Image (spheres, rainbow, N blue to C red):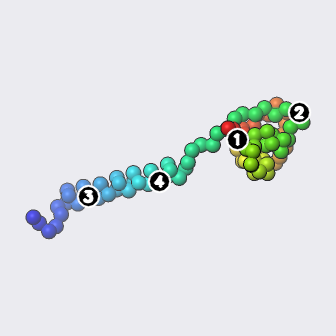
Amino acid sequence: MPRYMTAPSRFLVIISTMVVALVLLLATSVMAAGPEPVTVDYRVRPGDTLWSIAELVIAEDGDVRGTVAEIRDLNDLGSSVIAPGQTLVVPGD
């Protein structure tokens, strides 16, 4: 058995290594992404504020300020100004 690898064997080892590395990279990125957050649509009513909406959808032990920030992030809101009839994406169950 020769002590060196032929060109086709070397090519096969390189390709196999690249395939394994790619599979590991994809598996890692999929696991790091995690599940999508559950959201629901909420139609803003007269008198609603982000705070009052957050209080409606917050978990029992949640922080209203964090939920307000999450609603702003989910909807790409630059401020806390909302209008009746506007549909917002809010954290769901």
User: The disc labelled 4 sits on which kind of residue?
Assistant: Thr
Q: Is residue 24 visible?
A: yes
**Which of disc 4 and disc 2 is earlier in sequence?**
4
Q: Which is closer to the viewer, label 3 or label 1?
A: 1
The x and y percentages for residue 3 are 14, 68
**Which of disc 1 and disc 2 is earlier in sequence?**
2
Please give the name of the residue rendered at 79% of the width and 43% of the height, measured from the top-left corner: 54
Picture layout, residue 89 above or below residue 29: above
Please give the name of the residue rendered at 50% of the width and 50% of the height, measured from the top-left corner: 31
Element marked by disc 3: helix
Real-space Cα distance between discs 3 and 1? 48 Å
Real-space Cα distance between discs 3 and 4? 23 Å
Q: Which residue is mark 2?
A: 46
Image quarter of the C terminus: top right
**For the view shown, which residue lies furthest in the left direction?**
1
Q: Which is closer to the viewer, label 2 or label 3?
A: 2
Please give the name of the residue rendered at 35% of the width and 54% of the height, measured from the top-left corner: 20
The x and y percentages for residue 19 are 34, 52
Could you tell whether 67 is left or right of 13 in the image?
Answer: right
Marks 3,1: beta carbons within 8 A: no
Real-space Cα distance between discs 2 and 1? 20 Å
Q: Give the tally of numbered discs.
A: 4
Q: Which residue is mark 3?
A: 13
**Which of disc 1 and disc 3 is earlier in sequence?**
3
Q: Which is closer to the viewer, label 3 or label 4?
A: 4
How many residues crowd around disc 1 within 10 Å: few (fewer than 14), some, or many (20 or more)? many
Q: Which residue is mark 1?
A: 91
**Which of disc 3 and disc 2 is earlier in sequence?**
3
